Amino acid sequence: MPDEPLKNSSYIAFVKGFVKAFVKAFVQYGAIAPVAWCWQRVNIS
């Protein structure tokens, strides 16, 4: 599949961005808020 590396790199970029945002939220709000936010996200989808 020729588009596989592109899809993979965009997925990696998405995960990196998500982790970065999560860490930022974790630092700003402490442990509870990011976990609650993640839990909401998981429950919505």
Image: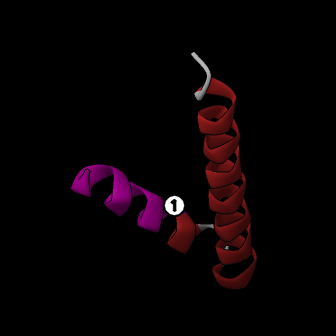
The residue that appears at 52% across and 73% down in the rendered structure is 33
Q: For this view, does 13 lie left or right of residue 32? A: right
Task: Using residue 38 as the reference point, say whether residue 24 is left or right of it.
Answer: right
At 64% from the left edge and 82% from the top edge, which residue is drawn? 29
Dot 1 lies on which element?
helix
Residue matched to label 1: 35
Say how many tags the image has. Answer: 1
x and y percentages locating residue 19 in the rendered image: 69, 56
Q: Amino acid at mark 1?
A: Val
The residue most toward the bottom is: 28
Q: Nearer the viewer, residue 43 or 31?
A: 43
Tell me the colour scheme of the image. Answer: secondary structure
Q: Where residue 17 appears, x then y in whole percent? A: 68, 61
Q: Which residue does the image show at 55% across and 68% down from the upper left?
A: 34
Depicted 34 relative to depicted 11: above or below? below
**In this rendering, is residue 44 above or below 24?**
above
**In the orientation shown, which residue stands out farthest toward the top?**
1
Could you tell me what secondary structure mostly forms the magenta stretch?
A: helix
The answer to which quarter of the image holds residue 40 is bottom left
Q: Quadrant of the N terminus?
A: top right
Give the magenta part as a residue range.
35-45
Is 2 or 23 nearer to us in this picture? Answer: 2
Residue that appears at 70% across and 51% down: 13
Q: Is residue 29 magenta?
A: no
